Amino acid sequence: PDLPVPPLASLRIEPTSPRVPLTVTPTAGAQGRLAIAVDLSDESAYAVRRSVQNYLRPGDAVILLHVRPTSVLYGADWGSVQVQTIPNSTTNHENTAISGDHSDEESQQKLENDFDVFTTTKANTLAQPLVDAQIPFKIHIVKDHDLKERLCFEVERLGLSAVIMGSRGFGAARRTSKGRLGSVSDYCVHHCICPVVVVRYPGEEESGKKKIAGEDAELQPVPEEELEYYDAEEEHGGLS
């Protein structure tokens, strides 16, 4: 008989620099605790789909992990999400009389709230392949201005056994023509305490059109060369 589709987990966006270690209750009978690190880009959506097809095993406890910039002004350094893409985030100068620091603070707070809603909605969209495959998961969103270090910190704090992430999207603007990893994925490869699986984004379709996050597509086996495996433990000899 078909198993019930797991419900989407309620989201909690945590503040910066937590002082108390977080305890995450794994899925019952979980074999491993894995995270798929996402940055709300099309490349991250691709990494989620490929994880479902090729990497996740029955019984794994899956966490969709996203580090949200402390300020939306940092968004340009974190994947493809720009402030202009946030619904209702633009200011209507004809209907709003803004004066003084208080109004500026209100405007900034509204922008932050809008971005929180946008982040939550986008994270649920990225998780759809997990829902379709009936894989139980949790969505974990935190805020920090230092995105790379916070991602590695959360990996340790959550006690993860492996992390899957895309090679593009994370700092993709700084990728070179030789196809080196983006700044965030490269940092995680060298600093995470657990193995990191980097999924290479295929780029353009044969038709020249880029894949769209959430696009309906038939799941096909991924060529082995599209997966790049990096084991931080082998490089660093474990946690120092």
Image: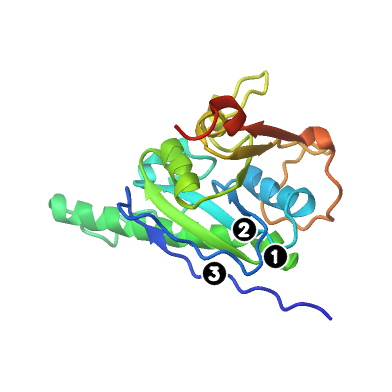
Residue with the mark numbered 1: 135
Using the image, determine if residue 169 lies above or below residue 108: above
**Residue depicted at x 55% and y 58%:** 123
Q: Amino acid at mark 2?
A: Val
Find the distance from the CA under tag 3 to the CA under tag 1: 12 Å
How many numbered marks, from 0 up? 3
Residues packed near mark 3 inside 10 Å, few (<14), some (14 to 19) or many (20 plus): few
Q: Amino acid at mark 3?
A: Ala
**Residue depicted at x 67% and y 23%:** 179
**Residue depicted at x 35% and y 47%:** 70
Image disc number at residue 16: none
Using the image, determine if residue 66 lies above or below residue 131: above
Residue closest to the eye, 55 or 178: 55
Q: Amino acid at mark 1?
A: Ile
Find the distance from the CA under tag 2 to the CA under tag 1: 8 Å
Q: Quadrant of the N terminus?
A: bottom right
Q: At numbered mark 1, what does the secondary structure look like: helix, strand or loop?
A: loop
Query: Can the viewer see residue 203 in this picture?
Result: no
Upstream in the sequence, badge 3 or badge 2? 3
Residues packed near mark 2 inside 10 Å, few (<14), some (14 to 19) or many (20 plus): many
Residue with the mark numbered 3: 9
Using the image, determine if residue 77 lies above or below residue 81: above
Q: At numbered mark 3, what does the secondary structure look like: helix, strand or loop?
A: loop
Query: Can the viewer see residue 14 in this picture?
Result: yes
Upstream in the sequence, badge 2 or badge 1? 2
Using the image, determine if residue 96 lies above or below residue 85: below
Left or right, residue 196 beside residue 96: right
Q: Quadrant of the C terminus?
A: top left
Q: Tell me whether the residue at label 2 lies in contact with that at label 1, contact meaning CB atoms closer than 8 angstroms.
A: yes
Residue with the mark numbered 2: 62
**x, y percent for residue 156:** 47, 45
Find the distance from the CA under tag 3 to the CA under tag 2: 12 Å
